[in-house]
């Protein structure tokens, strides 16, 4: 194996760690790595990854060696090409040797253990010498199927530590060795021996009892729990793998007018490539030629394709649904939106919440305490109890029931599933610490432009003079404005085309600087612009239309006058339109207990009109971009816990200052970088989804932690008092793991408010 080249600058390294069986293992590796000079490490048991920060020129091979020295395996992430076999076929990520081995051991233990338990529990099945048949069946389960626990316990012993595996190995080995003693040296091997299965400990002859069913049953149940954990962790990470697999593998690049197929890795910024209907757009870019509908549902969760034309931005991995497009690449590789989404999800899944760090620390000290309790229990029963058998059984039950195997999965598994489900819906949660913030937030500050509104000028109304046809007004004005590049002109042209169909080409066109445009359309001499432009040609608006113009301008809207053939014919009203779903989103935020606040640099009249339209009562208007952060700080000084939703560069400081920053993915990279949650969809309802999902994930984590730990503590006294059979203790412990991962997987059923 070749040694990786040293890194040239400070960097984060991600190691793939194998051999961990519980949170204590992760904790041990983390401590070992953090003892290295200049190294800061965080090891996540659920994701089986270590995130390590190292100084400049640090050799990653030293990290791998340190992990291996601890008794586990480690490897640097494989390059993308490593996910294919020698023939170029994609390897199935489900082909996991560890998972396969667990499955084989589990099946073997079930086949062999079920008869052992049946004979121990049902006296009628206890034929002559049945105990020796139990030994023959149970021995492979305890030795072969339980080998991973014994191996891990031996590794722990060499390092002077103890983990959950130590408890399992000690408990099952003790039960097995005691049974061998009772069979060969005691009275348990005598013909006709019977032993009733009991839920409580009763005085008995210690040398006449065997506990093969307990040892084999505990092994089987715990293997079942481990297998379910391993399988569920893979399912939980499916969203991230799906994201990584979304991108196109090849691209048709246009060079000298000829299409050439090249691997996606060879595509460079500035290259133009063709995308046919049904093909994925290879990377982020701008449409050069063509019109089409683009299906972005796999990235944004939106089911309705978006129409694109020349000049529109498109995102890599989205699907061209109709016409042929030529796209110029603007971002490639790790700079693309898809790659950044995957990075955000991966960071969130590999991070640790404060509650998980606490759980890891608890698990690290819990095992030695349990061993001590088991020894005390053994001693107390030997001194005060009815015999060795009762003492032994109680001690083994303590070892088994106290094993908090599910503790290490309680938080990360929920994070895996929650963040993965969010990614599927276009909600990217940056890290686990964000979850707590969403629970505390009581105020949400909403930037107006691009967040509540579309951020683009839109034709919102057309008012005609008496006797003038509205369609005619739009047709002539739209045709003339279509020849102009001004944003207001383009908004009018686009709105006219939507309502009136294809626009004519002006026979003559001239731009009157500062006033508007004039030209000839279908034989009509048309004027579009300021009212003063029409006045220059002795064209006057009627009093009713002039009053409507004044009213619209008072609301902060832009109004242009239209005239032709010597007469004023009407006005066109242009404004930054409210997104159709904003009012629904605001109501959704209110239902979550949040108070919405509209924040904008626009004038008061415009802001209040928008606020009234969507149902926001508190408005802060005419705020300079640099003062937005002061608004957030001011609300916080009043005792508010503030969330901020924005999309622009000028929103970035406020997003960073807020207790919870949510950036619209349709906005700038700076805003996205400053936020805690990125909303890939431009739909404000995604903010509602983000807070709902975060709160639900946090609730799942708390439920998991209760079942993963609290019941252990409650059951230890029961086991110590001799009231719990070791086999039932093993079943209860396995159920704890199953419950934790099963409860976490419920998050996969989370539904967006947009689809309810």
Image (cartoon, rainbow, N blue to C red):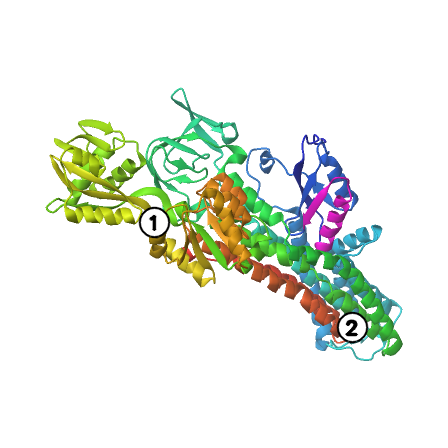
Verify whether residue 387 appears in magenta. no
Quadrant showing the N terminus? top right
Q: Nearer the viewer, residue 7 or 374?
A: 7
**Is 152 drawn above or below residue 495 in the view shown?**
below
Q: Secondary structure at mark 1?
A: helix
Dot 2 crowding, Cα within 10 Å, few <14, some 14–19, many 20+ = many
Sort mark 1 into few (<14), some (14-19) or many (20+) by Cα contacts within 10 Å. many
Residue range of the region highlighted in magenta in the rendering:
23-44
Q: Residue furthest top?
A: 256
Q: Is residue 369 visible?
A: yes
Q: Position of residue 137 (x, y in %)?
A: 74, 63
The Cα atoms of the two marked residues, 2 and 1, are separated by: 71 Å
Residue drawn at x 77%, y 40% is 37
Residue 396, horizontal then vertical, whole percent: 79, 67
Numbered circle sitting on residue 201: none
Residue 720's mark?
2
Magenta segment includes 39? yes
Question: x and y percent of residue 661 in the render?
Answer: 52, 49
Considering the numbered disc 2 on the image, is that residue within a helix, a strand or a loop?
helix
The residue under the point 56% across, 48% down is 430
The percent coordinates of residue 626 (x first, y second) are: 49, 43
Which is nearer the eye, 557 or 678? 557
The answer to whether residue 585 is above or below residue 72 is below
Residue 606's label in the rendered image is: 1
């Amino acid at each position: 194996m070749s040694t990786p080249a040293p890194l040239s600058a400070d960097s984060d390294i991600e190691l793939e760690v194998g051999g961990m069986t519980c949170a204590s293992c992760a904790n041990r590796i983390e401590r070992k790595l953090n003892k290295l000079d200049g190294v800061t490490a965080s090891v996540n048991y659920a994701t089986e990854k270590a995130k390590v920060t190292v100084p400049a020129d640090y050799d990653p091979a030293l990290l791998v060696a340190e992990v291996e020295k601890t008794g586990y395996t480690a490897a640097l992430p494989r390059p993308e090409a490593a996910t294919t076999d020698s023939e170029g076929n994609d390897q199935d990520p489900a082909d996991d040797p560890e998972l396969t081995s667990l499955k084989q051991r589990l099946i073997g233990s079930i086949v062999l253990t079920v008869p052992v338990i049946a004979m121990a529990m049902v006296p009628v099945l206890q034929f002559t010498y049945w105990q020796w048949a139990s030994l023959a069946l149970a021995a492979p389960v305890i030795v072969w199927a339980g080998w991973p626990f014994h191996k891990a316990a031996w590794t722990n012993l060499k390092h002077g530590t103890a983990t959950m595996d130590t408890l399992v190995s000690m408990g099952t080995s003790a039960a097995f060795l005691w049974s061998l003693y009772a069979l060969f040296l005691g009275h348990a091997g005598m013909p006709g021996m019977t032993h009733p299965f009991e839920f409580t400990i009763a005085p008995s002859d210690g040398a006449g009892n065997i506990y093969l069913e307990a040892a084999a049953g505990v092994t089987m149940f715990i293997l079942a729990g481990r297998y379910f954990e391993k399988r569920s962790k893979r399912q939980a990470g499916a969203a991230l793998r799906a994201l990584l697999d979304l991108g196109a593998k090849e691209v048709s690049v246009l060079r000298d007018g000829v299409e050439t197929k090249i691997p996606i890795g060879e595509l460079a910024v500035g290259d133009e490539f063709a995308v046919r209907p049904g093909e994925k757009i290879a990377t982020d870019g701008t449409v050069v030629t063509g019109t089409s509908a683009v299906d972005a549902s796999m990235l944004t969760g939106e089911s309705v394709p978006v129409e694109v034309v020349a000049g529109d931005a498109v995102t890599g991995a989205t699907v061209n649904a109709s016409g042929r497009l030529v796209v110029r690449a603007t971002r490639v590789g790790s700079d693309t939106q898809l790659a950044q989404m995957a990075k955000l999800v991966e960071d969130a899944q590999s991070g640790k919440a404060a509650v998980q760090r606490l759980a890891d620390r608890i698990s690290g000290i819990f095992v030695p305490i349990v061993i001590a309790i088991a020894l005390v229990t053994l001693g107390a029963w030997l001194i005060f109890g009815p015999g060795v058998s009762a003492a032994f059984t109680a001690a083994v039950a303590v070892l088994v029931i106290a094993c908090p195997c599910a503790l290490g999965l309680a938080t990360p598994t929920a994070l895996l599933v929650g963040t993965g489900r969010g990614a599927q819906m276009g909600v990217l949660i940056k890290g686990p610490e964000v979850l707590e913030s969403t629970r505390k937030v009581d105020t949400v500050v909403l930037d107006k432009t691009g967040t509540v509104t579309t951020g683009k000028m839109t034709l919102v109304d057309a008012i005609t003079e008496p006797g003038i046809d509205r369609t005619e007004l739009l047709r002539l004005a739209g045709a003339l404005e279509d020849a102009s590049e001004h944003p207001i002109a383009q908004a009018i042209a686009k709105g006219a085309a939507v309502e009136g169909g294809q626009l004519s080409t002006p026979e003559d066109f001239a731009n009157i600087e500062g006033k508007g445009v004039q030209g000839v359309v279908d034989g009509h001499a048309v004027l579009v612009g300021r009212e003063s432009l029409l006045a220059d040609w002795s064209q006057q608006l009627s009093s009713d239309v002039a009053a409507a113009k004044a009213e619209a301008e008072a609301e902060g809207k832009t109004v242009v006058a239209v005239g032709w053939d010597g007469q004023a014919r009407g006005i066109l009203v242009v404004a930054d339109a409210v997104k159709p779903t904003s009012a629904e989103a605001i109501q959704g935020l209110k239902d979550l207990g949040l108070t919405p606040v509209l924040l904008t640099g626009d004038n008061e009249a415009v802001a209040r009109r928008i606020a009234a339209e969507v149902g926001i009562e508190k408005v802060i208007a005419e705020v300079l971009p640099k003062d937005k952060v002061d608004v957030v700080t001011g609300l916080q000084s009043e005792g508010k816990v503030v969330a901020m939703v924005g999309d622009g560069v000028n929103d970035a400081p406020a997003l960073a200052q807020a207790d919870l920053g949510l950036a619209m993915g349709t906005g700038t990279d700076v805003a996205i970088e400053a936020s805690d949650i990125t909303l890939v969809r431009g739909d404000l309802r995604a903010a509602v989804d983000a807070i709902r999902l975060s709160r639900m994930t946090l609730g799942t984590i708390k439920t998991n932690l209760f079942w993963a730990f609290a019941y252990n503590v409650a059951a230890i006294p029961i086991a110590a008092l001799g009231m719990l059979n070791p086999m039932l203790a093993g079943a209860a412990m396995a159920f704890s793991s199953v419950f934790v991962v099963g409860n976490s997987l419920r998050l996969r059923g989370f539904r967006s408010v947009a689809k309810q």
